Image: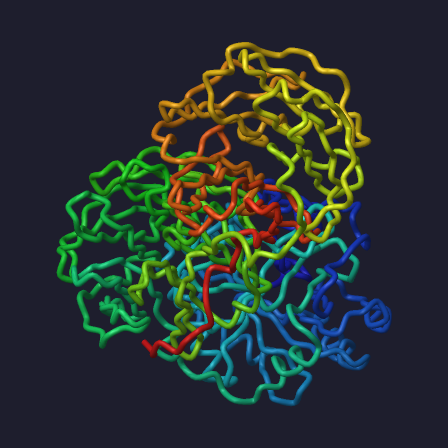
């Protein structure tokens, strides 16, 4: 057989550009998007560079590779139990002679002989390991069948999965790994491709103690290796990023620094069997036992299922077993009350892609399973999305290895409707985390962890998707699992839980991501009681600071340039005769000429437009409407519908709230009623984007002095409001004045009856969403 497979045998990276370009087998298809023309053009900008070679590269200039930056090398030693690399000794010693840390790899042919047999063959022919400081741990190359569909010397090699089931392949790897550990004291590194591993092994759990070497070949320079098989790993140790250069053979990068690489190579302590804490997965299941506290379920590697009742203080009570035989599932996810019986449910995915529903019984246990779907093996993440579309039924969000994010709406029976793709590019994250309503806006949200340890917050949009994300933390790689666990300290806010590899749990109390939106008041001026109207007009004089225009009781109009510190420069008159207007409102760049504009309403109900000139003045007026006397409030709404043109919001005395979309010429389209009951407020206040989500918002003051915040929904309306302050009756006018202290946040201004101005710096209403960690026990 050795003669039949050739001098080099099977090459690492069977679907890479170099291998497929030279393969005689028509059955082999390209997985990679790389091009042979990219050779030598790029390498990742992090980590430590290295290479791997085989009998197909018999003559390597090792000093050249060292000079190019390579500091480690892997050399093919064996394949099956029939092939040894004739260049092994020269390559293994050549790499070491120039100072590289080097190791050996074995190309597995699992349908040829047992894992134990091939492990012994590997160790006998170069696959050993010693703690000498320059020997990398042995590698199991477990990937696409290099002889797919071929019969060689009378042996049929089978399909890409070697005609073996996921369970058979998983068992083979464990047989190989356990034998290697017995012979060398270390579990091997597993080299694989995420797509093949998920397809052929079913993305199983339980292999996290094997270091991961991932193969992924981008078409252009990037530091993103793409998704890893997430049931066992959250990140990789080595990334094979190119088969076509810059280094000989395949090019690789170690995911760490040189000291970490040396530690990885030299750790002489035999790998112990995995601790219980790292050999099972945990899922948040809501209040499964109906005691008012959110609980956890743990899926152990022996197939047992354990229930942990929430203690209400961030921790959990002693666990109890609630089932056996759960090893048939590679994913278990709490899904809320999916069948609308008032109890918390669970789903499990089997390696064959079937999805199974377990109805909760309200006592911390589950009723018998029923199948609810097939084909779910295509996803590497399956997460409870809460009620993401507002129909009262919890949904799922899933991720495909290509980075596509999919939403599956619950149907209320425990099953799910047809999925809808809601995003791309999500392969950059190694874990998606259901948080429930993390920002206290009544809509379920999503967190995602990047392999660099950063955590990103994606607020739900209420229609099954998510708005633009933002980073809210770093350093989260210390956890092998992160869970959104609901409110486990009874403060009404959604909390987080992290589990470390040693089994310790760390509780992060949520803060609801809520502030009142503003800091304490600062004096900003005096003598402003001579004016009967004030309005924020944006940056009227084009100096980068938001300005204010005020009307004197004699009808003159005055311009006050923002000072950038919360106050205003000395005013100057810019017009007379403005007493003909009973409302004056700055409306942003309403005619899209890059300058800030103004409107005025006369007592006869006519509306007049004043185009700004960019220098702090206005051009002559033109009439843009009639009948506007029916409204008692006319407020700039900013771009409330996302079309890039500022709009108006108005209130009728009957409490009706109306939106008028700008048409881009300084006029407005036909109004639409967007709310009722707004007559309870005595002032509406345009704040711009007060909560830093990119959408214009609205404040409203009640006659009792309370201030209410209404976040914009991006479609001309507003979401449910909440009170953010009291005592605001001391002001006869309140303005949203944009960012007048240059900190990137929208500010407020209040005028008292004595003419003093008071500036309230905005805080953007943003927090990271969680407080410091607290130890919460071990599982």
Corner quadrant of residue 283: bottom left
Q: Is residue 381 visible?
A: yes
Front residue of 273/298: it is: 298
Front residue of 614/492: it is: 614
In the image, is residue 285 above or below residue 641?
Answer: below
In the image, is residue 29 above or below residue 9?
Answer: above
Corner quadrant of residue 587: top right
Q: Residue 592 location in percent, x, y?
A: 71, 23
Residue ID at (65%, 60%) = 240
Horizontal side of 413 relative to 704 (left or right) equals left
Picture quarter with the N terminus = bottom right
Front residue of 438/447: it is: 438
Picture quarter with the C terminus = bottom left
Q: Residue 620 location in percent, x, y?
A: 75, 16
Corner quadrant of residue 66: bottom right
Q: Is residue 4 visible?
A: no
């Amino acid at each position: 057989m050795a003669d039949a497979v050739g001098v080099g045998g099977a090459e690492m990276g069977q679907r890479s550009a170099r291998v497929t370009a030279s393969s005689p087998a028509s059955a082999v298809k390209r997985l990679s998007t790389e091009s042979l023309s990219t050779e030598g053009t790029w390498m990742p900008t992090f980590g430590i560079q290295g290479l791997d070679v085989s009998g197909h590269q018999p003559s390597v200039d090792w000093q050249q590779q060292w000079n190019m930056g390579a500091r480690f090398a892997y050399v093919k030693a064996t394949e099956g139990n029939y092939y040894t690399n004739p260049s092994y000794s020269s390559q293994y010693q050549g790499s070491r002679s120039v100072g590289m840390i080097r190791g050996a790899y074995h190309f597995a042919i699992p349908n040829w002989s047992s894992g134990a047999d091939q492990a012994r063959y590997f160790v006998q022919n170069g696959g050993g390991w010693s703690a000498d400081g320059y020997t990398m741990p042995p590698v199991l190359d477990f990937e696409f069948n290099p002889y797919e569909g071929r019969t060689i010397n009378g042996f049929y090699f089978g399909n890409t999965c070697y005609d073996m089931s996921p369970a058979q392949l998983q068992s083979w790897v464990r047989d190989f790994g356990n034998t290697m550990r017995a012979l060398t004291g270390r579990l091997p590194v597993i080299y694989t491709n995420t797509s093949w591993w998920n397809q052929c092994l079913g993305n199983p759990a339980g292999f996290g103690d094997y270091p991961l070497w991932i193969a992924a070949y981008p078409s252009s320079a990037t530091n993103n290796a793409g998704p890893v098989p997430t049931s066992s790993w959250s990140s990789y140790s080595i990334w094979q990023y190119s088969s076509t250069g810059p280094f000989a053979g395949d090019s690789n990068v170690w995911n760490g620094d040189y000291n970490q690489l040396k530690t990885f190579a030299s750790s002489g302590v035999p790998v112990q069997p995995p601790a219980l804490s790292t050999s099972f997965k945990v899922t948040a299941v809501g209040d499964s036992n109906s005691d008012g506290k959110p609980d956890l379920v743990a899926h152990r590697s022996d197939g047992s299922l354990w229930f942990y009742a929430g203690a209400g203080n961030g921790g959990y009570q002693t666990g109890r077993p609630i089932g056996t035989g759960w090893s048939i599932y590679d994913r278990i996810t709490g899904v809320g009350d999916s069948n609308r019986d008032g109890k918390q449910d669970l789903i499990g995915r089997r390696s064959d892609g079937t999805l199974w529903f377990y109805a909760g019984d309200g006592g911390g246990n589950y009723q018998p399973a029923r199948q609810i779907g097939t084909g779910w093996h295509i996803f590497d993440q399956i997460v409870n999305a809460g009620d993401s579309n507002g129909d009262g039924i919890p949904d799922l969000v899933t991720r495909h290895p290509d980075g596509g994010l999919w939403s599956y709406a619950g149907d209320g029976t425990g099953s799910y409707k047809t999925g809808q793709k809601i995003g791309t590019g999500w392969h950059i994250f190694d874990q998606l985390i259901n948080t429930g309503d993390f920002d206290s806006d009544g809509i379920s949200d999503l967190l995602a962890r990047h392999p660099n340890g950063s955590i990103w917050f994606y607020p739900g949009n209420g229609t099954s998707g998510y708005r633009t994300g933002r980073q809210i933390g770093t350093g989260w790689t210390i956890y092998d699992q992160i869970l959104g666990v609901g409110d486990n300290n009874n403060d009404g806010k959604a909390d987080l839980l992290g589990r470390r590899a040693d089994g310790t749990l760390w509780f992060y109390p949520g803060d609801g991501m809520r502030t009142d939106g503003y800091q304490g008041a600062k004096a900003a001026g005096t003598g402003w009681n001579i004016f009967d109207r004030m309005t924020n007009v944006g940056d009227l004089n084009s100096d980068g600071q938001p300005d204010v225009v005020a009307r004197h009781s004699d009808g003159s109009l005055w311009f006050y340039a923002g000072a950038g510190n919360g106050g205003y420069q000395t005013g100057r008159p810019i017009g007379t005769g403005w007493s003909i207007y009973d409302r004056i409102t700055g409306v942003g760049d309403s005619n899209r000429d890059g300058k800030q504009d103004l409107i005025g309403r006369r007592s006869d109900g006519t509306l007049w437009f004043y185009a700004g000139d960019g220098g702090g003045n206005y051009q002559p007026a033109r009439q843009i409407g009639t009948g506007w006397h029916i409204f008692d409030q006319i407020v700039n709404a900013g771009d409330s519908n996302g079309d890039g043109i500022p709009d108006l919001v108005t209130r009728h005395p009957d409490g009706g709230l109306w939106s008028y979309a700008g048409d881009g010429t300084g006029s407005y389209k036909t109004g639409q009623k967007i709310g009722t009951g707004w007559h309870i407020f005595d002032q509406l206040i345009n704040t711009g984007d007060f909560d830093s989500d990119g959408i214009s918002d609205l404040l409203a003051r009640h006659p009792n002095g309370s201030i209410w915040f209404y976040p914009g929904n991006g479609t001309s309306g507003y979401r449910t409001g909440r009170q953010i302050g009291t005592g605001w009756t001391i002001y006869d006018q309140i303005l949203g004045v944009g960012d007048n202290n240059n900190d990137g946040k929208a500010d407020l201004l209040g005028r008292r009856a004595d003419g003093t101005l008071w500036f309230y710096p905005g805080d953007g209403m943003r927090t990271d969403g969680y407080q410091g960690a607290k130890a919460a026990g071990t599982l």
